[in-house]
Amino acid sequence: MTGTYDVIVLGAGPAGASAAIEADRLGLRVLVVDEQEDAGGQFWRMPGPKAARAHAEPDGNDLRARLRASGVTSSFGRRAWFIEPGFRISMIGPDGIEEGTASALILATGAQERHIPVPGWTLPGVFGLAAATVLLKAQGVLPGRRVTVAGVGPLLFLVATAVLKAGGEVAAIVDVNSRRDWLGHSRGLLSRPDLALRGASWLAQVRARRVPVLTRHAVRRILGTNTVEAVEAGPVDAAWTPIRGGARRIECDALCIGFGLIPLTDASRLLGASHRFDPTLGGWVVDVDRDQKTSVQRLYACGDGAGILGAAAAPLRGRIAVLAAARDLGRLPTSSFEVQARPLRAALSRSAHFGAAMTALSAPRPGLTNLISPETTVCRCESVRRAELDAAIAEGAVTINDLKSATRCGMGPCGGKICEEAAAMLIAERTGSAREHIGTATARPPLRPIALDPLLGEFNYDALPIPDLAPL
Amino acid sequence: MSALIRFRFNGAEIAAQPGQTVAAALLAAGVRTLGRNPVDGRPTGMFCAMGICQECVVVIDGRRVEACRVVARAGIDVRAG
């Protein structure tokens, strides 16, 4: 909604919605913006069809109820496409363009999935693991009748269990990690016994249904002409490099595949905040201090967008960010800030421990790039194959921006969000360069694709004053 | 069971549950190919389901939008992107 606020929160997931509710409690005028139709973000997503509501996360329902009961102004169904310092947010929604201004901005933009292109991954019927959670939990739709679930991390078991619960069949779970990798993080997992128990129940359900679990395996190829007909999986070594032989064909009609989560940083990059590459937090991440403050004055970041620590840690970071913003705006005495932030920080350190263990389990290993064959499309939008990227790197492309200008990789409508991580891993592999030097693509508006006609509004070209031409 | 919502995809009738997105309704109806890639012509379909990848872009009543972000409404005309 167009207007002026004390605080704007971008994103209404577990972090953003909690931040907004806390801001309202502190008496701040607060606007929360999200492109979805309700709060919850990706993980606590509001189910669309009634049939899917039984699968809704109870925590998400609670969050939505608390947000509705608060005095927060919620702008749902709005896509924020530009943010100017100071802060002014430009949005497009069902009623056209809107603008919000505020002295403090809290980014709670969440995460996206990391994708590793394997041959055949552009076929319809291949979905991200995160996509599968949306389809199963929020849309009440199975990705396929017989589904292979592949990649890394806890989403493998969450998705497999959800497929079974919805009446589908799981052809196999293909996990690049070994059982030992999982056990290696058991201390971190046990920091939140409730969440560890939930994971154990997923595993028990998968076992009870005799779903084949291939550990230290990866999908090497996806087979089919117009859609998925089968996948070929084979063993990988400790660096996740495919080992010769041992390939097996798995008959299935859908594949859900993902390799962990990465923070969405385009908004904080657009605003010029400082960032660093930290694999323990999912990759490129905005720098925040213990109050969730970024390097830009009155800009705060929380939730998975400020490092992948999971949905349990997100609300705590959101509330700390708002307490800090209220203090910095002179609306909360420093002593009250300290008193209120202390218990949140204590709870955060337990939840963050759990989230960090999950992120470490999912951190990509260098062998993964060997799954990308020369003919595999890396940039889906612009159809750029690995061989073209390799050639550009051999000719001297050493940063993501170099590769983008040389090959158009990342220049399509998704803005490089799907291919950038794989492209950066390829540069790292070929040049031995650190990710800090490879960088990210320069963030530019629009943050997400938008239609131009709402921006133009009722503009009438005939009304443009055109001066008479000067006589020759 | 609430009444289904009916819309058209490339002329064929598709039924959606109230509240379901166009992409989810099409997937449930067995439609996986939602368009063609403008560069190499390969079939494209829903991939990220959260409005990021742009693979599920279709034309709804003359406007290009992500099918995974639009809730199905009765009578809309959806064309492959």
Image (cartoon, helix red, strand yellow):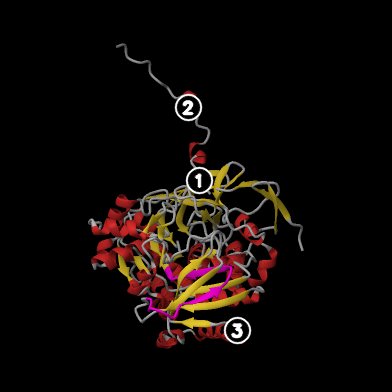
Residue B4 seen anywhere in this rendered image of the structure: yes
Q: Secondary structure at mark 3?
A: helix
Look at 35% across and 70% down and name the residue there.
Answer: A370
Callout in the foreground (2, 3): 3
Residue A258: percent from left, percent from top: 47, 69
Inter-mark Cα distance, 3 to 1? 47 Å
The disc labelled 2 sits on which kind of residue? Answer: Tyr
Q: Return the residue nearer the eye: B46 or B61.
A: B46
What residue would you read off at disc 1?
Answer: A98
Image quadrant where residue B19 sits: bottom right
Image quadrant where residue A430 sits: bottom left
Q: Chain of mark 3?
A: A
What residue would you read off at disc 2?
Answer: A461
Q: Are marks 1 and 2 on the same chain?
A: yes
The stretch drawn in magenta includes residue A250? yes
Query: Of callouts 1 and 2, which one flags the residue occurring earlier in the amino acid sequence?
Result: 1
Region in magenta: A242-261
The stretch drawn in magenta includes residue B45? no
